[in-house]
Amino acid sequence: MNLIKSIAVYDKQNQLFVTSNYHRNMRLLQSDPALPLPDATQVEIYPNRIILRAPIWAEAEGSFAAFSNGTPELLGYVSLQYNKDRALLLQFRDTTVALFMVLFGVLISVLFAFQLTKHVTAPITDMVNIVDKIRQGRLDARVDGKFTGELGLLKHGINSMAKSLAEYHEEMHQSIDQATSDLRETLEQIEIQNIELDIAKREAQQAAKAKSEFLANMSHELRTPLNGVIGFARQLLKTPLQANQADYLNTIEKSANNLLAIINDILDFSKLEAGKLRLERIEFNFRDTLNDVVTLLGPSAQEKNLELNMVVDPLIPNGLRGDPLRIQQVLTNLLGNAIKFTTKGQILVDIALANRHGQQLNLQVTVTDTGIGISKDQQKQLFQAFKQADTSISREYGGTGLGLVITQKLVQQMGGNISLESEPDKGSSFIFNIEIEVSEVIMGDGIDRAPLDGQSLLLFEPHAHSRRACEAMVATWPLTMDVASDDQEFSDKLEQDYSAIVLGHSDWQEVEPLFASIEQSKTSCEQVIALINSSDPEIHQSILQAGAKRCLSKPLNHHKLAQALSGHGPDSEMPAVLPEETQTRDKLPLSVLAVDDNQANLKLITAILKDQVMHIDQCTNGEQAVQAARRQRYDLIFMDIQMPLLDGIAATQEIRKQSQNQDTPIIAVTAHAMGSERENLIKQGFSDYLAKPIDEPALEQCISRWAAEVVSLQSYIDVEHPSFSWSTALQRSNNNAQLALEMLEMLMQGFEEVEQQVQLALDGDLDKTELQKHIHRFHGGTAYTGCSRLQGLCATIEAQLLAGSEPQSVEPELLELLDEIASIRALA
């Protein structure tokens, strides 16, 4: 071969055995003699040649070759010399051929790719563009061209999809157009309905206004004749009458009062439904307000021999701010129902302080009776208008079915809720809570505690609830009290000495046990006070004749009990004379003007006033009243509202502008019952409000209230003293003399309590924190009067207490405060 230049075989002694041709330098083919024979192929490369040596082994067992140590015998090696130039030429040729083949393959690939792009990629790109146009909303775009196989199927699918989308889009547009048309018609109908509703709303408002005006006029028209019926019936009852005549008149009065109650319920319900009933926020004495309710309803409970008791939490302050009239209305309604539906047993009113946050109180009131009870099914209808638990109830007990609805709405307006717990024949418990504020003006309970200080009292009261009520009543009084609940315990307690003994008795039909207790008590104590569940004067007289020093009716009034323990007040709440006997009372030295366009009402109020005041003038319209007020000064003016020529409001404003009665208390007397009447009338210049039909006790109370101010507070008018300045008082009341006197009166009502608290602080029985609270509240009351020195002392004491001073450190200022209070009192 041209590639092999020579071949030589060497034996195992590394000697040339045979060669293919002679080579002048045979040593090049021979292995290095200094090294072992090659046992593997060796390659030596030189610039112009390549030497290849390969070993020669004995081939197989049984041949002439011998084995050494189990391996074939190395016989020698063969050596070949390659011509390197020829090999390089062949390598170049082969490389060239391979490169040509690669270039040919690349060319074939390019041609194939071009054909692929032309027949596959371009159509797919066109289809992608068409799909993108369809996505953009151009639903008329289609894939053009002829395609076979999968591309044809893809083209058909894309075009079908575009066609379907176009059809759906067209249907959607048609649906949208239809929906838009329907919506437009609906909006037009709604607009028409809105117009109709607006018209209906205006008509409803006009109807509501007409209803309100009708109710107002109806109230006036009904109350005006009722005022005459009730008033003159009461006046006739004061005259000598035959028994049947008195019975007829009592029936007339009771029927008229029932009619009045129904009218009031309907009007209150109408005002609540219309949202026109507004609660007042005035300062009032809480315990006196409650006493008015139980005093009014007590006789009704006593007639049925029911034990009526009221327990008031001692933590509740006397002075509160709210609407006392509506609180009385709620309690009167619930207590009236309890008395109505209870034939035997007891009724308990429990008033507790649920919680307090600063000046805000939450009171919980529970009215519990032992009456007929109410089933679960009947309770569902209880707070619905014009419905009662049992339709037969209205026949047996009477009523409109509005009372509890009005009560619920009033409680809700006062920030509370009302609930009921009841079982048939086991009684009922109405529970409600109200939010109310503590008065900024300190109000005492009107009890002189000095005579009670140090007294020891024994209470014998078998009735548990009456015992609780009495214990709560005297909890804050400076006396000690022992309690006996049965005869044995009472006998044991009598071995001790007491200042007074209070005996409670429930059954007025059987008073012999009370007589025995009085006789037993007289052996230990002369001051025996009997509590009886009756207002019958004959029963009271018999108890006094049995040896009791005082006889009081249940439910107990804290003022009357304190007076009895102090040795003040009458021996009995009832007059000692028989009912037929008439009593004359001293008339107040007052001059009064009565104004009313209705002759019956004017005659009635004049008849009632004649028993109470010395001088009365009459006017039948507002113009006459203005002229009379310019001619003469009156102590009180009673002014009707609706009158011809000049109504009561205009007449009052004229009197306030120019007359001798600019500061005279003017009391509105009206049968109008819509809206916040009292508040509105006071804003118009009136001093107070008296509703028709005129209730003689209410009129008497009104006269007493304003007469007391006329008699006791008139002396402060025009006073200029270091302790009190009338000009300063007028300035702080915006030149309203009546308001100045009212603020002075409220301040003076708190004198007694402040004096007690200051004395406790001086004795070390009141810490600085509690004293600071009392001084702060009293300081607020002084800010609206002409008591500048008193205000300055309060500010100084309060500042020192807030700075951490103890009461003993401000003792000089406290003593000066007591002296200043005495100085203001001395000005009366």
Image (cartoon, rainbow, N blue to C red):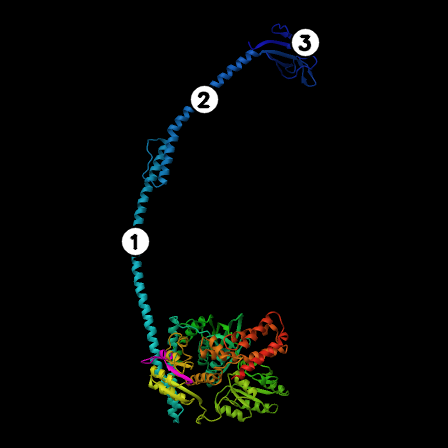
The answer to whether residue 470 of the structure is visible from this angle is no
**Amino acid of disc 1:** Asp
Instruction: State the image coordinates of residue 491 (x, y, percent, origin top left).
Output: 61, 87
Neighbour class for label 1 at 10 Å: few (<14), some, many (≥20)?
A: few
**Amino acid of disc 3:** Gln
Neighbour class for label 2 at 10 Å: few (<14), some, many (≥20)?
A: few
Instruction: State the image coordinates of residue 507 (x, y, percent, origin top left).
Output: 51, 86
Tag 1 or tag 3, which sits nearer the N-term? 3
**Amino acid of disc 2:** Gly
Magenta region, residue range = 634-652
Tag 3 or tag 2, which sits nearer the N-term? 3
- Residue 612 vs 148, above or below: the answer is below
Residue tagged by mark 3? 15
The N terminus, quarter of image? top right
Residue tagged by mark 1? 182
Mark 1 or 2, which is nearer the eye? 1
Label 3, label 1: how far apart the Cα atoms are: 119 Å
Q: Say if the magenta span includes residue 640.
A: yes
Instruction: State the image coordinates of residue 258 (x, y, percent, origin top left).
Output: 38, 82
Label 2, label 3: how far apart the Cα atoms are: 53 Å
Instruction: State the image coordinates of residue 768 (x, y, percent, origin top left).
Output: 61, 73
